[in-house]
Image: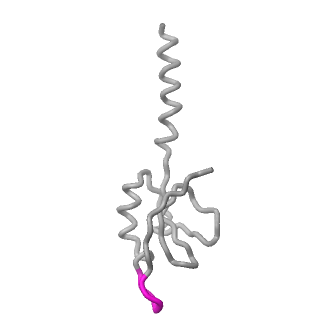
Amino acid sequence: MLTRYVVAAAVAAAFVTPALAAEFFIVQDTSTKRCQIVEQKPPSSTMVVVGDGKVYTSRTDAESALGTVQVCHSTGSTGSSTTTTTTTVPR
């Protein structure tokens, strides 16, 4: 009987653990200067992590911080930058 509880707890932990390990990054496309929130650190050199490279554990935290990242809201001679929020799904 105890074995059933142990197995049930192990199965439940296997499903919950990946959700707890979610990571969110604020990145900027260097060619378009657009910022977005992604779930994986970008391997591309055209996308760089901004906001001091901080890793956020929830999408809500990343969205709140997106408004405070100066490089995502700076203006230049070509006009203001646009901020977008997207989700990158790992394959």
Q: Position of residue 40 (x, y in %)?
A: 56, 56
Against 82, residue 43 (above or below) is: above
Please report the residue visible at 63 percent of the width from the left and 50 percent of the height from the top.
91
Q: Position of residue 28 (x, y in %)?
A: 52, 71
Side of 18 relative to 70 (left or right): right
Against 89, residue 54 (above or below) is: below
**Magenta highlight on residue 77:** yes
Please report the residue visible at 44 percent of the width from the left and 80 percent of the height from the top.
81
Q: 84 or 73, which lies in front?
A: 84
Side of 46 relative to 82 (left or right): right
Against 80, residue 7 (above or below) is: above
Question: In the image, which residues are magenta?
Answer: 74-80
Color style of the picture: one colour
> What is the residue that sits farthest to the bottom in this orientation?
77
Please report the residue visible at 51 percent of the width from the left and 33 percent of the height from the top.
15
Q: 91 or 6, which lies in front?
A: 91
Q: Position of residue 16 (x, y in %)?
A: 47, 35
